[in-house]
Amino acid sequence: MWQMVGRRETGRLPPHKFRALLQKTRLYSIELAGHKEIASAHKSGVNSLQIDATEARYLLSGAADGSVAVYDIEQATAYDHSTRTSKHEALFMVDKRVLNGHLYSVSCVHWYPIDTGIFVTGSFDNFVNVWDTNTTQVELQFNMSKKVYSLSMSTLATTHMLIATGTDDTRIRLCDIASGAFTHTLSGHRDSVWVVQWSTRSEWVLVSGGCDGAIRFWDIRRAGCYQILDQQCSQIGRRPPVLKKSSRTHGREDNLCTKYLNASSPIRQRGQKRSFGISAVDSRTAHYGSVAGLQMTADGLHMISAGTDSRLRLWDVESGCNTLVNYPSTYIRGNKGIQMAVTPDSSLVFTPSLNAILVYDVWSGHSYSSLRGHYDQVNCCAFHPQGQELYTGSNDRKILVWAPRRPIDIDNFDYEDAEQAIKADEDAWSD
Amino acid sequence: MMKKRDLKSLYSWAGSIVASSTPKKTEKRAKREQSATSEVESLAQDSHQGSYEKEADGFTVPSDTAVALRMIHGQFPKIDKVSVPPFVLISQVYSIVKDRTLVDRELEVMKQDKDVRVFKLSTGQDDFAIMFFDDYVSQVNAIKSRLDGKHPSEDLVIFDWYINHILPIHMDAGITDFHLESILSGVGHQIQERHISLLIKAGLLVRQLAHERSYWLAIPNIGSLLKSLSQGRKELLSLLNRRQYKEVLLSILEKKKLRMSQLDMRFHVRDLLGSGQLFLSHTPAGILVRIPRD
């Protein structure tokens, strides 16, 4: 560490590299935070977590008894001097006692991308509620008529404020907050839709993963999906940059058009084109089981998908190919989706797997560590970009905080406390 | 500048590794070794003259996955009752080559080059069997000759179509009715129900339970081996679970024989290592095989 600072001082290490190295060493040393604790207000398993995108200050959590709570993760509500941990309690909690509150399990929560004045929740009682944060009342309700598994709002959207919902129904319905009605119905999946995610590259592209194992890309300006990910269609590693092989990109553009029209012909790396009819398209799957989680990288060029066949796959979004990165020893089963987290520089992915969270390197699939601390199945992860902290919620009703290892704070060392601790250790009869 | 003696010993050392690990020598490898020795001689002459020439084509260093495949292929146990050519499970390859992403990618390249063929087995969600292309083709031909007297020849032509048209084009482990039809109509043949039922009877296609009209490509006569695979796994895991500390030295384990499996102990140990149900650790007493406690 000090050697690194010395090299930065003499100019041998450029500033951006110094910053990146520092962040990397901190990130790889993530463990249970001793200095921070979240007092979960829930009396049942935590199903979904989200940190707001605007200032990354508030954590929204939804639980299996229909309760939703908000925590301030920067400002502590209490400070425990003996253990030197800051305790963060819920700012408020809403459950079925509130008018129009959720009666059954809340499966997904989402902050409004523009500010924290509104948040959206979806639950197994078939309703999607839009809440006002300050009055903690339900402002708008959408009746989906089937269990809601997942919802998402686009963080890039400037022209629309649509909520994409994945339900037990095979159709994905987009709800509009501005008008209070359903604007789109996207059909194509053959079974219930467990995950929906908006693309981080375009405000019009929606990705959905279903119980049938298929991952579909939809452009909401047009009808029908324009891409289905096929696990057999693979490429070795990342694609070469566009400038090098212009002939191939030209061919790809052609294929993109035919793709949109017929939704067929997956492209292979070697330029072999296969043509299938429309009926064959439906059977292409991204996973052998159901798709349990989707996470796009920050630049929107790659996507990680988790399936109940206990596999994680890294997809190249533009070409629609499986990059064949193998993430070993995941264990994902269950009857609902999981929420994964990716660091903003797309170097690590955190996956819940039974009682632990597995940390993998995104590009090589190397498993760095497994974070153990929960007593029951972990359901969701949320990564705090600035603080490099990971918040995880599980069926044991707790929200745990994982942070990089902290050095002992010598300046604020409390001598009185230390003295008392030492005195307590002494035996009463020792000389 | 490398001396003549060093180069020769280097090549012979590499050749000896490949040779010692596989008792059987197949044609391709014998050819490769011959070319290797001829390269050594030519290179020896060049370096003696003081010039180092880059190795000419004919000898390419095989990839990690290819070497591991050959090694395990050679160690396939002898089974007397059924005639199945040796296959390798992908979990066995994972247990040997540590980097799984590399294995996946090199395997994909080998699939595209039509060196190997990957099949999905029905014993578990993640079981894939890898078989060399030539072995599989010879197996299909053996089945064709076995069914020769019993079916009319226009039905048996489906086996030729299978080898010549379907296998080279379709690389996936599964296939649908529609794909079969489209591939064969592309070359001018008309496929009918009786052809498909003949392929199913021969054991080359297996119906998929999840989707109608789609099939898994399969290895024929593999039923009893699949049974011994799953039962052998269970037996090995129960053998370890019964012990007090759920571990046993590898040297002791190798001497035991599994009662319910025709495949040998080494096959099952490698397979379970690769799928993460067993772990190896090095101790002063030798290599220890244990079941992880989490």
Image (cartoon, helix red, strand yellow):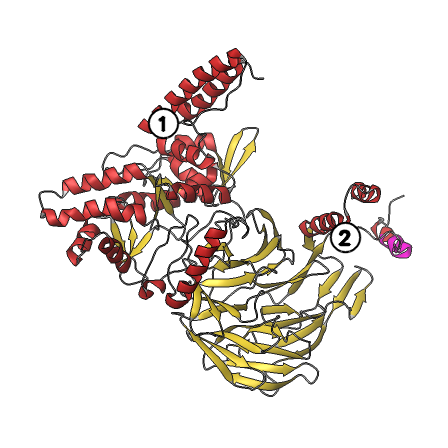
Specify the label residue B29 is tagged with. 1
Which chain does tag 2 point to?
A
Quarter-of-image position of residue B86:
top left
Above-or-below relation of A105 to A361:
below
The residue indicated by pointer 2 is: A406
User: Quarter holding the N terminus of chain B?
Assistant: top right
Question: Residue at 52% across / 45% down in the picture?
Answer: B292
Q: Is residue A167 magenta?
A: no
Task: Look at label 1 and name its amino acid.
Answer: Arg
Q: Residues within 10 Å of mark 1 (few under 14, many from 20)?
A: some
Q: Residues within 10 Å of mark 2 (few under 14, many from 20)?
A: few
- Asked whether the residues under marks 1 and 2 belong to the same chain, the reply is no
Q: Secondary structure at mark 2?
A: loop
What secondary structure is the stretch in magenta mostly built from?
helix
Above-or-below relation of A222 to B88:
below
Q: Secondary structure at mark 1?
A: helix
What's drawn in magenta, residue-wise? A412-421
- As drawn, is A110 to the left or to the right of B70? right
Q: Position of residue A193 (x, y in %)?
A: 45, 70
Q: Is residue A38 visible?
A: yes
Above-or-below relation of B45 to B66:
above
Which chain does tag 1 point to?
B
